[in-house]
Amino acid sequence: MRSTTLAITTLFLVTGSGWATQQYDASGMVVKVDRAHNTFVVSCQAIPGLMDAMTMPFEVRSGKELDGVGPGTMVEFTLVVERETSYAENIKVRRYEGVEQDPLTARRLKLLNQLSDPKSFAVKPLAVGQAIPHFTLTDQANKRVSFSQFRGKVVAMNFIYTSCALPNFCYRNTNTFGVLQKRFKEQLGRDLVLLTVTFDPARDRPDVLARYARAWKADPNTWHFLTGPTEEVQRINHLFGMDFFPDEGLMNHSLHTAIIDRQGKLFTNIEGNQFTAEQLGDLVQTVLSRRPERSLAKTVGLGSGSARP
């Protein structure tokens, strides 16, 4: 365990009586926001000269600093360290603006199709806090899997197609879940479930998904690779904002990772792949530990942070 206070004390001991306010550039993924206490918790990257990568809370001087900040957002900010306190300021949300060809083309094709055929996009993406509609698909073990069976568990959900040839898209998404599978080995099945949904059901049949899942040593009881009828698969993908279009045997597609809480409601839907597997794991851990009746101070401990292994 480490803390902001510990880091400040260490810095003060080094600088001695010649203390001067220090400022550091910081960045990471937000895992929790507590507006009532002007505090947000960040899975923070290492800050050279101050601290290692860790998950910890930061205070802000004004609640307005937290406008637009929510779980799953990537942020950059200035950490101001004074002799006896510290706070974050100049918080900037780092919006996903993928310049990679696949997401960019998918976005353009979506806009064109919306103009030519608005009815084809009748399914509106879910908003944070909305309940996930019922759906049933088939997993790699050729078993029917209904979302309702995961009530009371946290669900991490992403979207791929097994023929994706680019290592920084579907492969990276799957690898991220592979890291989660190792990190949360004890919680999987009991408190956490991983769902990977294809958006290419014509080719990604259960037997294909089974081969793909075996390559990642996925436990079919806790990490389900899902497929089904084309219309149903498309509906589910669109519920989470996924865009995908065939292109010479491959797919132009967007990137989304969703976390769903124990009540079956969307906690966050992250667009893109700017986060690390460790940061996504920190976010999942926050949702696993989440108790509505408990304050931020009781849940994460104000003033303390947990270093990543």
Image (cartoon, rainbow, N blue to C red):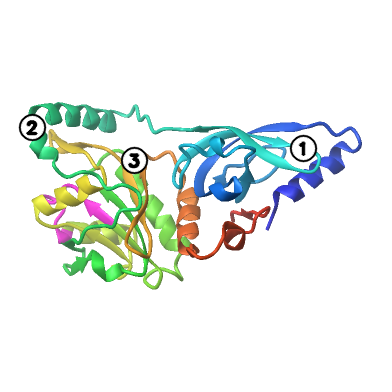
Residue 15 appears left or right of 60: right
Q: State the extent of the magenta-drawn residues as a range.
A: 196-207
Q: Nearer the viewer, residue 38 or 257?
A: 38
Residue 22 at x, y = what percent? 75, 32
Furthest-bottom residue in view?
A: 190
Density class for disc 2 (Cα within 10 Å; few <14, some 14-19, many ≥20) is few
Residue 167, label in figure: 3
Helix, strand or loop at mark 2: loop
Quarter-wise, where is residue 64 in the image?
top right
Tell me how far mark 2 sits from mark 1, CA to CA: 57 Å
**Image disc number at residue 117:** 2
Q: Amino acid at mark 3?
A: Pro
Q: Residues within 10 Å of mark 3 (few under 14, many from 20)?
A: few
Q: Residue at x 70, y 52 (%)?
A: 3
> Which residue occupies 37% across, 65% down?
262
Mark 1 surroundings: few (<14), some (14-19) or many (≥20) residues within 10 A: some
